[in-house]
Image (tube, rainbow, N blue to C red):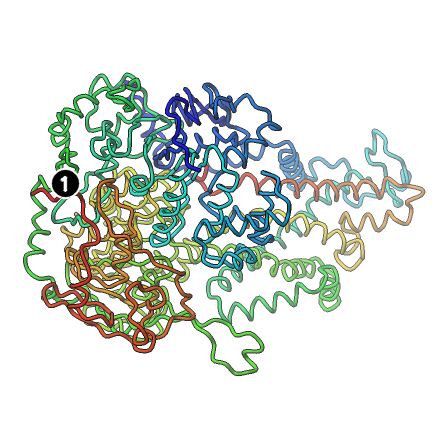
Amino acid sequence: MSAAFSEAQVIQQSAAPSWAQRFASTVKRLYTRPASAFGASVFVIFLILALFGPFFAPYGLNQIIATEARQPPSTAHWFGTDNLGRDVFSRVILGAREILTLSGLGTLLAVISGTLFGLFSGYQGEWLDEVIMRFFDSLLSLPALLLALLLLGVLGPSSNSVLVVIVIVYTPIVARVVRSVVLSVKNKAFVEAARLQGESLGRLLMREILPSVLPALAVESALRFSYAIFLVASLGFLGVGVQPPSPNWGLMVKEGRNFVNQIPWALYFPAGAISIVVIGVNLLADGLKRALQAPGSE
Amino acid sequence: MSRPGNPEKPVLNIEDLTVAYRQGDEWLTAVRQVSLEIRAGETYGLVGESGSGKTTLVLAVMRYLSENGTVRNGKVELDGRNLLALSEHEMRKVWGRQITLVPQNPQSALNPSIRIGEQLAETLRVYPGLRPAEAKRRAIELLEMVHIADPERVAQSYQHQISGGMQQRVMIAMALSTEPLLLILDEPTTSLDVTTQAVILDLVRELIRGRHTAALYVTHNLGVVAQVCDRVAVMYGAELVEDASTRDLYKNPLHPYTRGLLDSVPKLGETKDKVQLRAIQGQIPPLGERPSGCVFRPRCPLAIEVCYERPPLYEPAMDRRSRCHRWDEIDRGEGERRKRAFRFGGKEHSAGGKEHSAQQPPPAAAQMSANRVDERPVVLNLQDLDVHFPLGRSLPELIRQEPPRKVRAVNSVDLEIQRGVTLGLVGESGSGKTTIARAITGLEAKTSGRIELLDVRLPAKLSDRDLETLRHLQLVFQNPEEAFNPYLTVGESLRRPLVTLMGKSNKEAEEEVARLLEAVRLPPAYARRLPGQLSGGEKQRAAIARAFASNPDLLICDEPVSSLDVSVQASILNLLNEMQIEHSNSMLFISHNLAVVGFLADKIAVIYLGHLMEVADARDLFEPPYHPYTEALLSAIPLADPDAEQEQIRLEGEIPSPTDIPSGCPFHTRCPRFLGDICVEEVPPWREHEASGKRYFCHIPVEDLLESQERVFVFEKQEQ
């Protein structure tokens, strides 16, 4: 009787888990560690702010209330008001959309191009790999901020330029990560078996190799995303990125810097927002690394 | 020095030992109520497959259990002292003095940054507390004791400068240096080649026999146990299932698992047309899913109602134990008849231990041996095949314009495989056997020579070959764990070759997948599983199914069973055999295991340093004349029969590096039948033995070999 029972159990767990099940189990594992749970929550909260910001913000983006300029935090103005009389709370909330869109879109494009380069370069190997990777090395040899400043000098300051900068600065880094996984996978028996079955190059890369790359790629993307937020804010602070009156947090820190002795809240809150988002996304990246493993490897 | 062991008092006494590991909230029992006694001067074999608990038992004895492992019950007494009650501080006086270990992997056990001599001397300074100069002298003596020819030089070497066999000798010297009460050998030869293994086994036998030390020899290899041990304990599923003297165990096993293990390994010289391997059905249950009652019940051909109750350890005779309810029936031979009824049958296991076929040989195989295989159409033809890998040059070499050095993996190999024939390719590690397979498949480009498949010359690179060629040629990989994409379902992986190579629609392919799975005896529902949900043996079955998807004319199997547990190997070998009979495909079967190759192959090629040494029909390979290398190889194999007689031919020295292959005959540096200058200077001719058609690559003429050679091994008196 007990034998029949155990056989029934075996049959129950037979089929491979679907993508939805895997996603759910990843999220579940993510929430078992407090730090990862914090990171994921921060990310989700800011994502909601970015999507529905205008719904939460009590004042308009550039709504100037001249009579209430330079006010400290109060029930009317939670984060106080800035030099011109704009509500800092509203601007921080509305700034979430701007910064997350810019850095998110930039990261996405960089991840796509970096993945394509990394897959192709790593799989083909030989001289093509040398050419691509040495070119990327030369880009990586410059400090990211310096490279960004150089590029912006050429492109001129604007949102689109910042986007281009993120893609150019991060593509080589993503490509490196992807390539290293490709190198460890491409000589495994299952890839060789696929080659012996006459699979096309595209199918080999996308169907056989890419799935093994995805866990590392997810972690790297989250990490790149946090650095992209940082970069967008830094460029705003330096005044070469997004231009006023945009609610870029970096730009707000720059403007608040001039009055730091009189109205420190105009600097602290946007700076705090940058820190929290960057730390949160970093923790999320770290949590993803632990939560993502090849299915069935447990 | 050798005192007779005191039979009254055991050196190591394990009583009712139960060890469990914690996983989450669960306790998984890895060793269950095991009792063992090892007396002084006795070598005790502990045999089991992966997951049997043998490693955990050793760890528990040594008090090396990992954080999540605990001894839940029982005691471990060394010389009357309960080890489990000792503190860490007290244990430190036991480790290295009273208990020493020869590990499986000497590479990681030796410190890479300390010279060998110093490592030995260090132990001796701590215990027995020799002065530095004395310790140094003693270290050299110890190296001499393990027959290291040049102890001074080895003492001055670092770990990476000496070969694996040499490292293992150093470990043995180190383990015996403190005259321990108990020596534990944990699979000490598993990572070594068979010719090196033979030398190490000789050494272990010689050194332990002359001492008061008790030894526990842990291994999965039944042949090794028969060669070295006095007594054997067999473990399965955390339990000790049988315990007997070596002779009793091999001659008259009283547990179905032991019997199954012995019958599932092909014996040297057995061929597929004479016997069918009796595979143990099913697979080893994972730690958490052990069946109730007898652990072996789900796989046991003798299981009946009573087996749902856990059997006690019966004592059928003095010093014999078996955890089987039906041991007395097995003893009386009644099990045999039942066994056949349970489709376990095949060869008879007479009390004498010599098997002969009780079943009709498979018809196709019989037919095959009837008409000579050489007359069939040739499927694969290799001519003068070379595969060399150039090495990078150093700057001085570049400046001096020296030609780049090459790893000469495969050198002028000529081979033919006829339709429906299995060619076995045997060689030690680094012999180039896998490179040949990779060159034929195009995964590695050949350097020169011809590869012809069905009279069509194949391009060197895989990317230059057309789909038609790919369809005719498929490969089964060594490691089933890597053979499937872990992110795709088994069904998806099986479907692809049907689509790409056979041009089927997705829907047709889907139906075909179920048929393929059935052919390798896997349930069709497995198509929806991920590879991670299959066991090693099941994965290899699925890999065979995938290879047969395109119905290839030539199937290459690269060590397909070497990473599988012994009890699973036989069923894979049987499956390959059946598939071949059904599809009449040719097969290139690569292995380092001569018994396995001898069983499955019709013809056998022996390879050494990328050169073929001998090509013979399978049944002739085991009869003289032999190539001297084949002779040495056959004599090095540990036979799973304590009464078998075997010639003692041991190869000296190390396998030369394939960058620097010796001139003349590549084997001349180690050849026991070395003639003289001719072997060094001249490339030997291929000679043929008329009667058998056997060809070999040697200067010694057929008549001389026949005169000086006898059959290398004889299993007891041949009764017929």
Chain under numbered label 1: B
Q: Residue at x 52, y 48 (%)?
A: B108
Query: Considering only vertical position in the picture, is A53 above or below B148?
Result: above
Q: How many marks?
A: 1
Return the x and y of residue B549 as percentages of the image width and height.
Answer: 24, 53
Q: Quadrant of residue B45?
A: top left
Kind of residue at disc 1: Glu
Can you see residue B412?
A: yes
Q: Quadrant of residue B183?
A: top left
Taking depth in this image into account, of B657 and B76 the one nearest to the observer is B76
Return the x and y of residue B677 as percentages of the image width and height.
Answer: 32, 76
The residue that mark 1 highlights is B355
Instruction: Work out which quarter of the rendered image holds the N terminus of chain A and state it.
Output: top left
Secondary structure category for the residue under label 1: loop
Return the x and y of residue B388 as percentages of the image width and height.
Answer: 39, 71
Return the x and y of residue B668 as percentages of the image width and height.
Answer: 33, 68
